[in-house]
Image: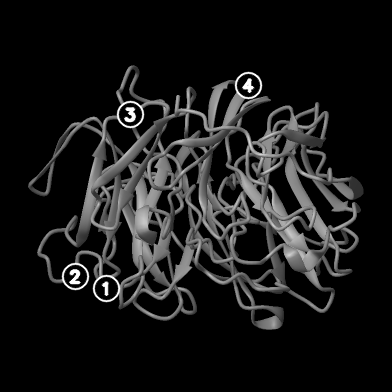
Amino acid sequence: MPTLAAQPAEAATTPTVSLVWSKNFGISGKPVALSSPMVATLDGGGSSVVIGDRAGYERAYHLSNGSGLKGWPVSTGGVAVDSTASVRGSGSGARVYFGEGNSATPSKGGYRAIASTGKIAWSLKPKAEPGKPATAGVMSGLAIGNMQSDNSVVGGSMGQTQLLIDASTGAIGKGFPWFQADSNFTTPAVSTLGMSGRDLIVEGGDSTAGIAFGKRYANGGHIRILKPTGNAGTGNQGGGLRCEYNTTQVVQSSPAVGPFLTGGKWGAVAGTGKYYKGASDSNKVIAIDSSCHPIWKANLGGITDSSPALADVKGTGHTWVVAAGRISNTSSRVSALDGSNGRALWSTTVPGGVYGGVTSADLTGAGYQDVIVPTVTGTYIIDGRSGKTVAKVGAGYGFQNSALVTNDPDGSIGLTLAGYNGKNQGTLLHYRFTNAGAKGANVNKKGAWPMFHHDQKLTGDSQTVLTAKP
């Protein structure tokens, strides 16, 4: 466990939350699981929430009243969707991107782009192995960035290869497919990491002992930084890495990036997983610099496969690493860690396992970020300064993803949760904060992490500017 600092003062205002509307998809055994709700503006009805489920549907509903959009839901033909959507543009020109697939059937699925009308724009299936016909599904979210074009999308697969794709045309980028060697469940961060040039690809991954394309792999995982040109010009299907840090445990937590290290230097931070029993990097959150040198590791006392956030929990302009360790299915520990050394500002235990990741927003107008923590027993709100749990919503429901916080059409703060009820049916719940100081305009300011992987493009970059009204 990281060493605890002294507890700061508690918040002056406790959030008040009211349920506005809910949806029950009514398909038992096919819930919303790891797919986190995402915000998009797809028609004249204002902003909507977009979500995927294990029944094989990609759905969209207006945030204002829960009404459905014409052309949605979109069927995958029975392929489960565990990825979170990314979104480019708004209105009639908007595109929504999903990875499709689930680890129970890793050969089914792929990459898909959907127009605002629900029409499929393009769809691709990555190869499970280079040069062989079998394909692999995709649980990674598709991050959008300035890579080979201004709007490229990239994500790992459950096979040995991954694709970088032109977001408009569906054309596979030069230097891809790229040989990732083993399954990759993480949504990549895309960022320049404070350097000039196009965005780099920062991702986690699994590793199994063996040799492929002249490279020896060990049991464990990686946090790696891949050039946007992939293996182009290298003569090796796995060439093109800027650097990588090899771990003794799989890395199944989607990395967050930003200038959180000492002196404002850029770094990446991710948790691990649980595949290799007794591995030394189990239960760890690991921070590396932009050259993949390890800076610190923090043991959170539980499985860290949920995704960290970078949030200004003290209101000082400095972002802290906020991450969860799943002790069991009934208990998790959430910690705010100093980005320079991994030391904890606070550490709070909540009931229920955390699987998806935390998000944050200024819910009271006090000028700092509060933390939203979905678990399988409900969703807990933690005061960012004190680490005290101040509210619970979604009692009686289970959540295995990240919550979405929005500047709603009426100017209030909205909170959308997606999960399952006691019958294991997919459920969508939309709340609004009604306490004094709760203003929608506060949601998307600098220092916030209001949705899975920070923003609509899933960049995972704390410096990506959040749009005031998506």
Mark 4: which secondary structure?
strand
Q: Amino acid at mark 4?
A: Ser
Spatial distance from mark 4 to mark 3, Cα to Cα?
Answer: 20 Å
C-alpha gap between disc 3 and disc 1: 34 Å
Query: Where residue 331 is drawn, which disc sits there?
Result: 4
Q: Nearer the viewer, residue 186 or 72?
A: 186
Is the residue 422 above or below the residue 127 in the image?
above
Picture quarter with the C terminus: bottom right
Q: Earlier in the sequence, mark 3 or mark 2?
A: 2
Q: Nearer the viewer, mark 4 or mark 1?
A: 4
On the image, numbered disc 3 is attached to which residue?
281
Cα–Cα gap, marks 1 and 2: 6 Å
Label ID, residue 174? 1
Res. 443 image quadrant: bottom right
Q: Nearer the viewer, mark 3 or mark 1?
A: 3
Identify the residue at horizontal 30%, vertical 24% (top origin): 280
Q: Which residue: 50% across, 33% down?
A: 104
Would you say the residues marked 1 and 2 are in contact, meaning their CB atoms lie under 8 Å apart? yes
* Amino acid type, label 3: Asp
